[in-house]
Image (cartoon, helix red, strand yellow):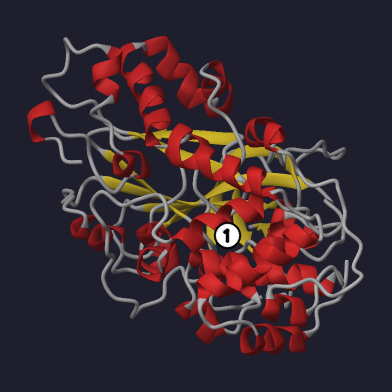
Amino acid sequence: MNGIHDMGGMHGFGPIAPEPGEAVFHETWERRMFGLRRAMTSPPGFSIDRFRFLRETMPPAIYLTWSYYEHWYFATALSLLQAGMITIDELRTGRAAAGRPKRNDAMRPADVDHAMRAGGKFARAVNTPPRFSLGQAVAARNLNPTGHTRLPRYARGKRGLIHHWHGGHVFPDSSARGGGECPQHLYTVMFSARELWGGDAAPNDKVYLDLWESYLDPT
Amino acid sequence: MAQDHPHDHEHLVGQVPSDPALRIKALESVLLELGLVDPATIDAWIETYETRIGPHNGAKVVARAWVDPAYRQRLLADGSAAIAEMDLLGVQGQHMVVVENTPSVHNLVVCTLCSCYPWPLLGLPPRWYKSAPYRSRAVMDPRSVLREFGVELSPDVEIRVWDSTAEIRYLVLPERPPGTEKMSEGDLASLVTRDAMIGTARVGPPSTRTP
């Protein structure tokens, strides 16, 4: 979706503010939200792509004013609401409604190390050969889906060169809507800064994006 | 998967406590009551990323590449395999690509769409990396971004910006500073900063190192 999250190339957000000696978490609730997200039982069919997509559906003014772990709260709470696993009253009061069954299959502390080491692998076999070869000229398609996509607006319609082929990877546009992993070939595509931003960009600068096969056309 | 209900958004933002501490405490309390989370598991995740996982992991990889040319070659050819040799892959960093800074090429890593970051090597991202100013500007005007971090590059240095749009995670292999030829791998690792591995800093010689 063409949301506020797609920030590449926007003006007006002001200077970057690095904090020397920054702590991992600034607030106790940030720490809790991080741990809760990693430890909790997710709704069936939930995925990292669904998580990102729900963050993108935040109203833009909220997206810009809520901080990173508040985004996590929003997407987590919304996913539970949509799955019927929690109610708005429960989110408001912090108390489970009377008579709700209690599960006993949550992740245990002893599972954390394995989940940290082994989790998050997205390479998948794809049974068709890759459509593009290294060095081939391609153009990013001009796609404007209302659902999740990882093709940023600033690259749409722009021409680049295939820099690397990563094999098959889970396709987020499908995974985010609960449509299955539908893996596709994934490529790193090199764009010149001038192709993306015009003649004022430095002549040798480049921007590299990881793009799935269905985002690309040959030129 | 349930369909999206736009009204859920208004519901959520308008009806939950406005204080994030209360909002998140309420969520945790309900999930605990429903048996959807074990608080000890929450603590274990927090502890993992506050103590065990952080930029010191990435620094070990960089220092190894500086002292071992064969490792450097393997790292640049197949980042995941070379990092697996040091047992440093993990969630949000299973598919790794390492890009090398040289006198003529400077690399910078960003995620314009969210805040993708190589957790196993650098820990959780700093606030500025997740912020709108960095995400909006790094791809379009990397030189102004670098200038704000005190890195001034000659116009003939090629900047390569890596926008983390998939599950590939990027680590910058910074240039080894001069005057470190006799340093051990462990001492070299202590010179390598988080920002140098994102590409918003260079590694200075030992006497000028900044935290």
Q: Which image quarter holds the C terminus of chain B?
A: top left
Q: Quadrant of residue B175?
A: top left
- What count of labels does the image hold? 1
Check disc 1 and give the amino acid type. Answer: Met
Looking at the image, residue A178 sits to the left or right of residue B85; the answer is right
Residue B155: % across, % down = 19, 52
The residue under the point 85% across, 40% down is A128
Residue A73: % across, % down = 61, 68
The residue under the point 68% across, 41% down is A120
Report if residue A53 is visible in the image: no
The residue under the point 84% across, 75% down is A97
Q: Chain of mark 1?
A: A
Residue B208: % across, % down = 9, 35
The one nearer the camera, A113 or B96, is: A113
Residue A71: % across, % down = 57, 69
Residue position marked by numbered label 1 in the rendering: A33
The one nearer the camera, B132 or A118, is: A118
Looking at the image, residue B204 sits to the left or right of residue B67; the answer is left
